[in-house]
Amino acid sequence: MNVESHVAELERDGYTVIPNALSPEEVRATYQAVEELLAAEEAIARRTGTQSDNLLTAHTIVGKHPVFYEFFLNPPTMQIVRQMIGDEALLYDANIRIPMPTGAANKRQGFQLHVDREDYTVLPFVEGKHFPMAMNVTWCLVDFTIENGATLLWPGSHQSCRVPDPESRPPGYVYAEAPAGSAVIWDAAIWHASGINHGDSPRYAVLAYYIRSWMRGKTDSLRFIPPDVRPILSEEARHLLGFRPAPPDYSDVKALSPKQLAALTVEEKKVLGFAIY
């Protein structure tokens, strides 16, 4: 894999495609995990609208199935993500998204033209120069085609530092066509929209959203990863999810080594001002 080429495409066009990011065996295992997770959640998901005839989704999936405990450390993907937003990049969100072959869309569920989390990916840079704050990744578990609604992307639009009209369809878009096993990576500030599936089978995909390590959003990994899953995660996975010491920069805390910080009791942390309950 030519990392420099993929980075150059992201910087210029706002997106890139990594073929064979998943092996055929990984594609099959992930597909099966998706099926199992959707089936386990179906009753509640149908009632809440998370699954419908037009779109199947599952949210915060890292701790919901063993396949996803380490999935988001996918090496080809992480090489590019870390080049773009830093070695300490965090996984902010991860989900399953499957547009169904109905030729229709669920209104306001990503099918309109949009950027992701414009409050920090676009709006701070209006009238200025774009700076990449977050990366979206979609792993294709089936071939992404125009017919089955491959994601629409507007190359170079991330440099505009503008939020598009969600109801518009300006010219200049491309479809993120890619074979199964590919990872499609795009800058969160690029204009994009989900395609509508006019094919004859569901378009299976796993999605992830990575942010710079010093960002803080509304998703709290410390709470959405089940307690019984946390000890199973590798150290690298825990690091990716934000399970890392984050003490304040007070002088008396700075004087402590990582080992000393780890050995502090809750009462000692309370005195130092960063107790976690």
Image: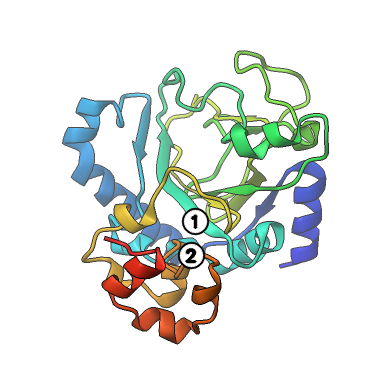
Name the spot of residue 217 as percent of width and height, x first.
Answer: 49, 45
In the rendered view, tell whether residue 194 sits above or below residue 166: below
Circle 1 sits in a helix, a strand or a loop, which is it? strand
Q: Residue at x 35, y 51 (%)?
A: 61
For label 2, the residue is: 240
Disc 1 residue type? Answer: Leu
- Relative to 202, is 39 on the left or the right? left
Name the spot of residue 272 as percent of width and height, x first.
Answer: 40, 69
Residue nearest the observer in this picture, 57 or 272: 272
Disc 2 residue type? Answer: Leu
Q: Residue at x 55, y 52 (%)?
A: 210
Sequence-earlier tag: 1 or 2:
1
In the rendered view, tell whether residue 232 sits above or below residue 74: below
Q: Which mark is residue 91?
A: 1
Name the spot of residue 184 as percent of width and height, x first.
Answer: 61, 48
Report whether residue 23 is seen. Answer: no
Circle 2 sits in a helix, a strand or a loop, which is it? helix
Name the quadrant containing residue 267.
bottom left
Residue nearest the observer in this picture, 119 or 170: 119
